Image (cartoon, helix red, strand yellow):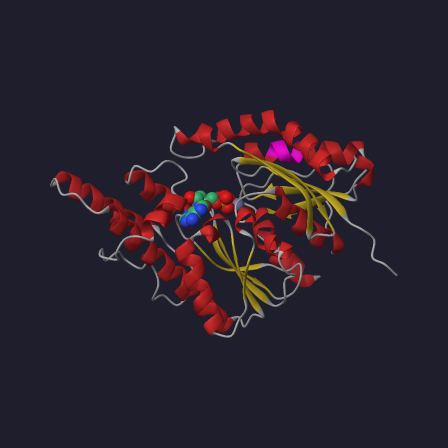
Amino acid sequence: MEEQTSLILAFETSCDETSVAVIKNGNEILSNVVATQIKSHQRFGGVVPEVASRHHIEQITICLKKALQVAQVTYADLTGVAITYGPGLVGSLLVGITAAKAVAWAHNLPLIPVNHLAGHIYATNFVTPIQFPALALVVSGGHTELVWMPKEGEFRIIGETRDDAAGETYDKIGRVLGINYPAGPTVDQWAQSGQNTFDFPLAMVKEDNFDFSFSGLKSAFINTVHHAEQVGETLNKQDLATSFQAAVVDVLVTKSLAALQQYPAKEFILAGGVAANHGLRTALQTAVEKQGVPFVMAPLKLCGDNAAMIGAAGAMLQRHGARADMLLNADPGLEFDWEANAAR
Ligand code: KG4
Ligand code: ZN
């Protein structure tokens, strides 16, 4: 018997991107509309929550209409509505949740709650179905997590940042170098033409756990730049970027390989906005493949926040019976429901 077609309308508004997508069978993008607010936040040097919420309100119905139009589907064709309910900015999350609820209610469709990090991981589903058990490194503006997935639908965070996220660290040190928010892509570009001449600290690399810490590296970087300014010395920005990136990549690769030792995975997934980083991608792929483990990541345009990835995770979760009612609320600090999943 042919499997029934799943056609999911997905919403993502957890940070500064308003996005609505229509996803067929969890792995085919019929539309993926992304309205970015970066320009509005640039003058503040980072995302301002209240400004983000207002933009989401302005954009959400425009994105919704466009997503349906591009996909050439109507509400009657849909089989579910997937929504990011955390982690993220509470006001931003609430805009997407309210829109998703309204559509689900008005058209009598199941509402599927999706964890934003599961979405980042499931962006790889557009390349190849995930092979379990799998290990994922999710690196973004708000997160740095190693996630163990023993089987489909089960997520367990085995390591995470104790302070700043990797992307956040890029954005903060980039600001000191005079780069606009988000600084990650430019620091990455500069890092490719400099020399590793500064000896920045490799945080927690020797510790016997899979957690990360980037605040020491960030402070060392900022102190180096400020000290040079005070004594009237000019530092080479490319060399600073190369040295910083080498320290970040070293820690991420070392911890990922250590995790692979303890959690033998059939594949290793690199996900999140920082996965676009050239240095990280190449170093991690080489190191992981050297261990005989396939390395997978989403196409670059699906590494940042988007609703297509929420639709992919939503399709999987719907197959496993995940469903929310109209009481669904935003959960800014949402964690993976490992215990509940493990008990199932
Ligand atoms: O996943 P994402 O779009 O949003 C969050 O969920 O946070 O990630 C955005 C983050 C920003 O901090 C940005 O500076 C960083 O990803 N980023 C990069 C690169 N491209 C984006 N960081 C380092 N190198 C890059 N090439
Ligand atoms: Zn994200």
Q: Quadrant of the N terminus?
A: bottom right
Query: Which residues are drawn in magenta?
Result: 94-98
Residue visible at 27% across and 49% down?
Answer: 238
- Residue 108 in which image quadrant: top right
- The reply to whether residue 245 is visible in this rendering is yes
Q: Is residue 264 above or below residue 119?
A: below
- The reply to whether residue 165 is visible in this rendering is no
Could you tell me residue 65's position as x and y percent? Answer: 70, 30
Residue visible at 51% across and 35% down?
Answer: 16
- The residue most toward the right is 1
- The residue most toward the left is 231
In this image, 166 relative to 134: left or right? left
Could you tell me residue 145's position as x and y percent? Answer: 48, 55
Give the camera-side residue of 118 and 240: 240
Residue visible at 64% across and 45% down?
Answer: 308
Could you tell me residue 182's position as x and y percent? Answer: 41, 39
In this image, 235 relative to 286: left or right? left
In this image, 189 relative to 85: left or right? left
Q: Quadrant of the C terminus?
A: bottom right
Q: Is residue 33 above or below residue 309?
A: above
Q: Count of labels shown?
A: 0
Question: Does the stretch in magenta take in 28?
Answer: no
Give the camera-side residue of 186 and 325: 186
Could you tell me residue 150's position as x and y percent? Answer: 61, 66
In this image, 219 relative to 281: left or right? left
Residue visible at 48% across and 53% down?
Answer: 275
